[in-house]
Amino acid sequence: MDTIKFGTDGWRGVMARDFTFENVRRVAQAVADHLRDETLKAPNRKKTPWAAPVVVGYDRRFQSEAFAREIAKVLEGNKLPALCLAEPLPTPAVSLLTQRSKGLGMVVTASHNPAAYNGIKIKFGGRPASEALTGAIEACLGRSQPTRAAEIKTKSGRDLYLQYLRAKADVRLVRGRLKKPYVVDYLYGSAAGLLEEILPSPRLVTMHAEHDPLFAGLSPEPVADTLQALCARVKAEKAVIGIALDGDADRVGVVDESGNYLTPCQVFPMIVRYLVERRKLKGKVVQAVSLGYLAARIAKAHGLPFEELPVGFKHVAERLASGAAVIGGEESGGYAWQGGLPERDGLRTALLLLEMLAATGKTPSQLWKETESKYGVSHFKRLDLRLHKPVADKAVFAAKLVKKLPKKVLGSEIASLSQIDGLKIVLAGDHWLLIRPSGTEPLMRVYAETDSPKRTAELLELAKKWIGPSLA
């Protein structure tokens, strides 16, 4: 049981070691027991069965479909209506179906992790499950032995998801105004083939759409290290942009027309600018504490409230779902905004990025230079450092680190400290360093952003010295 723990975005493990059919059945049974508890909490106290279907989706990883079918069998064995998707689809497609059905969803995916991993994400009401919900499911682990049915129902969710995306994009504008090629790298993930149906165009160039459960030996994560082929293809095609989607297609990575990778600390401010200035969205802008300072400056310039949240898109989604925010983003490349699901969606973001280029008539580098000139320069970098063992308590870790801090960091006074998630040290000029232990892995994630590559590197090196004794 100790191997099953939900972190910032679900439960993940190494297949055949942690992520096994036995453990997957345990999670499915825990979901069934939790839903039974929720039924008994109904005001009339009648023991009526849970009525909304539990949507079960999966990605293109090895055995993902088989794991999904096993989940559906356990749910059906517990007299719960389970709807197993007939094909691998992006995680946001499952979120959409849970919004329509007002039910719960389970997605078999390890997102951006290497091929040896798999996992389960929980969705509810069109967005990531809250910590309260995943905690309640964890509390049910081991209560009952899994009960399985012999037969399950499958249904395609492809058309409904494509219909939703078409309704959220200005396809005519993109097809009419973008005259140069644009390249989309599916990274062998579950979005493969979908953009061609939404945006049929001879200028759309796609990569890595074939089914490869090993992801060609790479992690399907849209970050600089894994997007070298996309950078080269953008230059070879003389394309206006390159967009990559992660393994379950809820996040994006962006390459400009010169083949340069743009960090999320560059992409999110450009998205915020477009949504505020062109689409005239008004309301609070929220982001994970690990994102940069430019979005806050843009919000302030337009008189909009701004808030930082703990890492994990579920926190952003809660604000969007309640109407407390209109735009949200996270450092790993997940974005959402008013008018759609309160859920990050790589394809919806890809369509918005293409719309931005078509509407403005500018390239990504031009849009970035405009943003820099108005709101400041950003040089962001992140390191993942392996530890001897996971940090048991983030708050205790942060408190101990605060006591060790010098009065000045690289010659600058400390302007503020934040312990929303780990420890964020903010210096003069909004420069910052975030030291954040992973909640589920023996990793220390270190982030820094300043107005120069040299100073950013210096902050990261300083952080490595502070946490040095804990490194593996």
Image (spheres, helix red, strand yellow):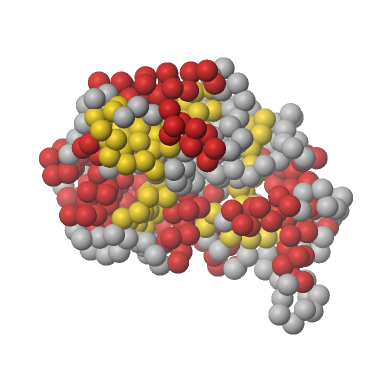
Residue shown at 31% from the left, 29% from the top: 407
Locate residue 294 relative to residue 327 in the image: left or right.
left
Q: Nearer the viewer, residue 65 or 329?
A: 329
Q: x and y percent of residue 209 in the render?
A: 48, 35
Q: Nearer the viewer, residue 140 or 209?
A: 140
Residue shown at 60% from the left, 21% from the top: 388
Locate residue 143 relative to residue 245 in the image: left or right.
right
Q: Nearer the viewer, residue 226 or 141?
A: 141
Q: As displayed, is residue 2 above or below residue 298?
A: above
Locate residue 460 relative to residue 277 in the image: left or right.
right
Q: As displayed, is residue 104 above or below residue 370?
A: below
Quadrant of the drawing holding the N terminus:
top right
Residue 163 appears in the picture as rendered:
no
Q: x and y percent of residue 175 in the render?
A: 27, 51
Residue shown at 61% from the left, 57% from the top: 132
Q: x and y percent of residue 27 in the render?
A: 74, 48
Residue 463 appears in the picture as rendered:
yes
Residue shown at 70% from the left, 54% from the top: 137
Locate residue 413 relative to residue 461 in the image: left or right.
left
Q: Quarter of the image holding residue 10?
A: top right
Q: x and y percent of residue 391 in the render?
A: 58, 32
Quadrant of the drawing holding the C terminus:
top right
Q: Quarter of the image holding residue 20?
A: top right
